[in-house]
Image: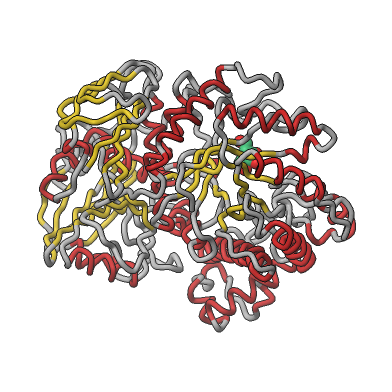
Amino acid sequence: MTEEILYGGDYNPDQWLDRPDVLKEDMGLMKKAGVTVVSLGIFAWSALEPEEGVFTFEWMDRVIEELHGAGVKVFLATPSGARPVWMARNYPEVLRVNASGQRNLFGARHNHCFSSPVYREKTALINKKLAERYGNHPAVILWHISNEYSGDCHCELCQANFRLWLKKRYGTIDALNKAWWNSFWAHTLSDWEEIHSPVPRGEMTVHGLNIDWKRFTTDMTVDFMNHEVRALRESGSDLPVTTNMMAAVETPDRDPGLDYWKFRGVQDMASWDSYPAWHAPGYKAYDFEEKGGPGAEDYRRASEVAFMHDLFRSLHHKPFLLMESTPSKVNWKPLSVNKRPGMNILSSLQAVAHGADSVQYFQWRQGRGSFEKFHGAVVDQSGRDDTAVFREAARLGELLKKARAVAGSAYGSEAALVYNWENRWALEDSQGPVNTPGKGYLEAVRKHYYCLWDRGVPMDIISGEEETLPYKLIVAPMLYMVPKETAKRLEAYVKAGGILVTTYLTGYTDESDLCHEGGAPGPLGGVLGLRVEDLDGFPPHEELSSGLTGASDTADYVEHVHLTSAECLSRFSGYPHDNWPSVCRNRYGRGAAYHLAGRFAVESLGRFYGDNLKAWGVEDAGRLLSDSKGAVNIQVRSSRDGDFLFLMNWSAEPASVELKGSWADRETGKEGRRWDLDGYGSFLLWGKK
Ligand code: GAL
């Protein structure tokens, strides 16, 4: 989109309309911090249309002119994330109805019904006005559509739309009854009108209904976004569009409940908001030895954030935008820990390392009141530029200028990991077969990702439903829901020479969450070369070894598999699963499929990947390294002329790296092979081709 790494953040001058002095001050401070872009007007609807049909764009005219004069670009927002009070008063239908059937009162944000014709009309109108007025302004370079779309609405309009959606999907009520297995508990329906969204005082036990409601909610949201974009296009703006998305695995509580894979058709590029709980105590996601000494949970967290960056890059297979992050603290965490010195540069460079073409904050300046007055900002209540936060932000601004050649450069992955929302929803909703909390899908995905990230294997994240799978390795943990089409593509991928890794709980159900006839792994039986007899929940006091490391390393899930054409590479030892295959391989066509029949500890998984990557022909960071000490992760982005190498130390302890070749520091120009990193230190290095 531009030839630089854009730098800036959410800017809310609509909170300072009576203070032109603050606007002036902001322009000076932005220059000092090296800001090149702001996201403007995200929650400004009441400042833009204070009364129905009365538009007040003059303040925005002034702000955009000032920004333009200061050389700052604008991501202009459509304001649908929060509606003005007159709209809720005049048209209560715009407010959401919750799962208890109550219509919400005016308040908060993201409190609007996507079905409401009034909300759609009002949104289209304000979007058109914005596009007409600013769509051709030289400072405005992208549309920031709404804000973190999320949530659902249970009003009558949404119920009617849901029924229409179901009619389209199933055609007849009989087909729906079959797909939802409605003969169970006498649920057979005779008319579409009998269908209601899943709610606690009604139906929550039909898995097919639950997942279809989530699919519908995604489709409605995508449809609403399309509606917003159409209004901009009809007013002659052809600027690229994006919507800022939320984390999905980094912090499970931030999951939007939407299938982001479905947004690929409606936006031009991906952008997301990253708020990990850096340095926070008491959050231990899974079993592994912390790297890098005390407090080094950040190393593991860094892998979770890296996963998200990879996901958003993979969404469109091109650079994405880091639309929001905090320069210091996040005020809504259970404990709001400030980023430690170096951490803001480190975490921002990490985004760039994984394919971001921007680093942006929430927020540029702290507001004086309400919910986010204590959220981190580049400019805090003091308004000063000599705070530690401002200084580090300004240093990063300088560094990103020197890194401009990174913009647009590629991130090459030979490996991909499957993360599939529908699979997650189906698994999490299912009663059994073994009820670990949330079934541990996120945990499994993160664990496998961690083991590859830890070795510096570049990875794409995919849904598993892509038409083409141009990888050497695909890892699909707990792919429980496997429609026939997905199985066909994975099978063809292996036949053509690919390596597939699957685990326990693979291929149990189809797209309606109906169990495959003949049992698991359903349509993957041929390519995996095995069948599953049963899955056992494994209690924590029993010990079981997969044979990978010799240690007791298996928890929660143990599958009893019988080999049809696969070979057994390792067996379980321990009562009562002695001798059951734990690791299987099926050579198939020119490739091979591996099946891991239990939930192994990180160490064993790491051993599994470490032992096999070379044979699979998948490169890791070893090709660049002579030696590495400490919690360092390495990533590469490549351009035509050379490679950018990112060295990142995810611990408060110093670290050092010895590279095979000589590289130049982009910040200082220094060249060398050996790089000593401070705690939370980072380097952006450059090597000519
Ligand atoms: C994001 C949101 C921003 C701001 C931020 C605070 O989810 O998009 O508007 O609220 O969180 O962390």
Image check: 455 left or right of 151?
Answer: left
Point out the quarter of the image occupied by ligand 1.
Answer: top right
Q: 601 or 18, which is in the foreground? A: 18
Q: Quadrant of residue 386?
A: top right
Q: Is residue 309 left or right of residue 91?
A: left
Name the spot of residue 541 as percent of width and height, x first.
31, 30
Which residue is found at the position 59% from the left and 58% from the top?
Answer: 204
Q: Quadrant of residue 40?
A: top right
354 vs 189, nearest the viewer: 354
Residue sitting nearer the eye, 210 or 465: 465
Q: Which residue is drawn at the image coordinates 85% and 35% (left, top)?
A: 18
Q: Is residue 149 visible?
A: no
Residue 514 % position (x, y): 42, 67
Q: Is residue 649 above or below residue 187?
A: above
Q: Quadrant of the C terminus?
A: top left
Q: How many marks?
A: 0
Asked whether residue 363 is in view, the answer is yes
Q: Where residue 81 sits: x, y (%)?
A: 70, 51
Residue drawn at x 52%, y 62% is 211
Provide residue 506's location: percent of width, then percent of height: 31, 57
The coloring applied to the image is: secondary structure
In the rendered view, tell whether residue 370 sits above or below residue 584. Answer: above
Q: In the image as oriented, which residue stretches furthest toward the front?
A: 69
Q: Is residue 79 left or right of residue 34?
A: right
